[in-house]
Image (cartoon, grey):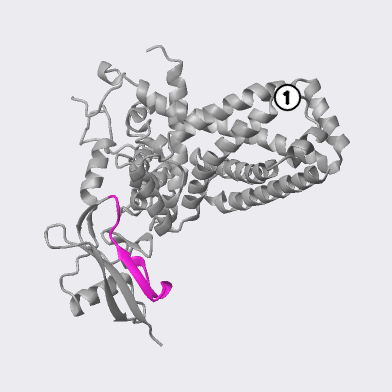
Amino acid sequence: MSTSFVLVDRPEVRRLSRSRADALWDLIQVLSGLGLALFLAFHTLLTASVLLGARVLDAVAGGLEAIHLDTLAHWSVPVLFLVHFVAAARKVPFRWREQQALWAQARTLRHADTWAWVFQAVSGMAVLLLGVIHMWTTIGAGAIQAASSAARVQSDGWVILYLLLAPLGQGHAVVGVYRAGVKWGVFQDVHRAQVVRVGLFVLGGGVLLSLAALVRYATL
Amino acid sequence: MSRTLTFHIFRYNPQDPASQPHLQDFSLEETANMTLFIALNRLREEQDPGLMFDFCCRAGICGSCGMVVNGRPRLACQTKTKDLPHEITLLPLPVFKLIGDLCVDTGSWFREMYTRTESWIHTNTPFDPTKEEARMDNAVAEAIYEMERCIECGCCIAACSTARMRPDFLGAAGLARIARFALDPRDERTDRDYFELIGNDFGVFGCMGLLACEDVCPKNLPLQNQLGFLRRKMGITAIKQLFRKD
């Protein structure tokens, strides 16, 4: 009896490279994004430790440097940053027609998750620029210390960069983790509202913590 | 006290060279239990016999009357006017070919999607008409039935930003169709076979997880869960293929 379907053993359907590339880029996007989100959580806690006192931050940073975690972060984070940008940019509508379609859709649909993705794309571009400036000026600038961080925040205009970078980066990370969870089926539909509430709580806490730390650096 | 509803309805006939796309205003007194289907029929009967829109079952079963209601794709027959403000804007579903006014051709889109997803049971088992049908586990049958509830209204496609930007994207309806066959034990296709169909940016990896499909589906299909299920399945298949020599 004749078969009614395509068998993968047929040589002409073995050319999978392009298809596999899309899947692998998608995996790279989610893994690099989760790695960066995890780093950002640690980074937020480290910088916020200044709220417990300059000595606490210096001690925590010194401890991390003693086990060379700073060195690990200094080469792995820029690599993850670049890889994540390349992987995620594949989905960003750079063409004018795509932009028009997306904005028209977001405006008429008035759908929170669609707007969250627009925020994701816009904040991603902002974080790319601001994050590169931040990394360029901090990596290789010596040991992490409360005094040097305070001096940076207090020098001309830098506080504006951090006032933008902290909430945008954290917003991008929280929305990204949520989106990765729903895309890969980690968060099921029955838990979606709950996950959104937890995400907003984490985001609110993170932004408050960062802003409080910035105030501390500005007045240290 | 009844309201006077103001409808802003998209009018355009692509067959008429003189026709220009525009919004036309209509007024109508709201009546008890009025749906958009009832309102549109009254407008056609009482004010403009040339108004084009689709309907068939009037009960949310046929999926013909999908349209964009105040920005959201919905079924006209399931939408009560009392749940809407007095100003109602009606547009045809985007993505699909416009026939005229609020009518779109969802049929051609779904026909092509069925071809692309090879939307039939693939089996090499010879059919024996004298044999009893093979038994299926009840839970599996119910899971398959859940996905078969799709009425092909096209609302999920119209609400999908990816489908708006990339016309070749299969959309939630297409991917849910694959999920239905992936669940079916009678279908002998392997994960690699499915990967051939949807393991790229036109398929499951093109989905950006905006979930408008899930949120507008008039049948409340579990699209989010199915898209996650397929993405994991196809992601694992891609990793496995990396380590295969053939």
A31 sits to left or right of A98: right
Q: Which residue is mark 1?
A: A70
* Subunit under mark 1: A
Of A136 and B90, the residue lying toward us: A136
Q: Secondary structure at mark 1?
A: helix
Percent of width and height locating residue A58? 84, 31
Q: Which image quarter is the C terminus of chain A in? A: top right
| Residue A93 percent coordinates (x, y) | 40, 41
What kind of residue is marked 1? Asp
Tell me where the magenta segment starts and ends, as one range: B78-95
Camera sees residue B145? no
Residue A172: percent from left, percent from top: 58, 42
* A24 shown above or below B44: above
Q: Quadrant of residue B208?
A: top left
Q: Position of residue B33 (x, y in %)?
A: 36, 77
- Quarter that holds the N terminus of chain A: top left
Check the image and report above or below for A199 versus B206: below
State the residue lying farthest toward the top. Answer: B245
